[in-house]
């Protein structure tokens, strides 16, 4: 599934926003806004209209750095824990609890 929103989804999100940032209600200008996932795509995999929001550049950057990145990192740690994988300090590979080496996918 694509990470990007389709053109119809972007158009509907823009209409819903009414030319205003859905975070701070500032007026949006061409090139100064982003279509953003409410729930990060890395976690939800959802690129629907429900998960799309139109944000000004400032709101987008703040949301991405303060909320999305830590949430994705925690999700990855939990997923690895439940898969029986742990990361050894100083190594760029993963080990299962039984000692089997698994290389991380980039």
Image (spheres, helix red, strand yellow):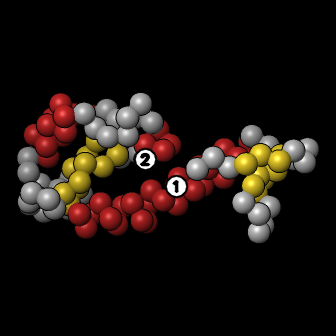
Instruction: Locate residue 74, reporting x and y percent.
Output: 60, 55
Number of numbered callouts drawn: 2
Instruction: Locate residue 36, reporting x and y percent.
Output: 30, 49
Residue corresponding to mark 1: 71
Q: Earlier in the sequence, mark 1 or mark 2?
A: 2
Question: Which numbered disc covers residue 40?
Answer: 2
Residue drawn at 80 percent across, 61 percent down: 88
Q: Are marks 1 and 2 in contact (CB under 8 Å)?
A: yes
Image quarter hosting the N terminus: top left
Q: Is residue 106 above or below residue 57?
A: above
Density class for disc 1 (Cα within 10 Å; few <14, some 14-19, many ≥20) is: some
Check disc 1 and report its element: helix, strand or loop.
helix
Q: Is residue 41 above or below residue 30?
A: above
Instruction: Locate residue 79, reporting x and y percent.
Output: 66, 44
Q: Is residue 21 left or right of residue 2?
A: left
The residue lying toward the viewer, choosing from 4 and 77, is 4
Q: Is residue 57 left or right of residue 73?
A: left
Can see residue 96?
Answer: yes
Q: Is residue 38 above or below residue 49?
A: below
Residue drawn at 29 percent across, 60 percent down: 60
- Kindly indicate the quadrant of the structure image that contains residue 90: bottom right
């Amino acid at each position: 599934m694509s990470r990007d929103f389709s053109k119809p989804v972007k158009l509907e999100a823009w209409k819903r926003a009414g030319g205003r940032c859905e975070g701070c209600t500032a007026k949006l200008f061409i090139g100064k806004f982003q279509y953003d996932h409410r729930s990060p795509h890395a976690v939800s995999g959802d690129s629907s209209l429900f998960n799309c929001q139109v944000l000004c550049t400032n709101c987008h950057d703040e949301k991405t750095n303060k909320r999305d990145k830590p949430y994705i990192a925690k999700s990855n740690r939990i997923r690895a824990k439940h898969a029986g994988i742990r990361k050894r300090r100083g190594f760029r590979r993963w080990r299962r609890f039984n000692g089997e080496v698994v290389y991380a996918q980039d």
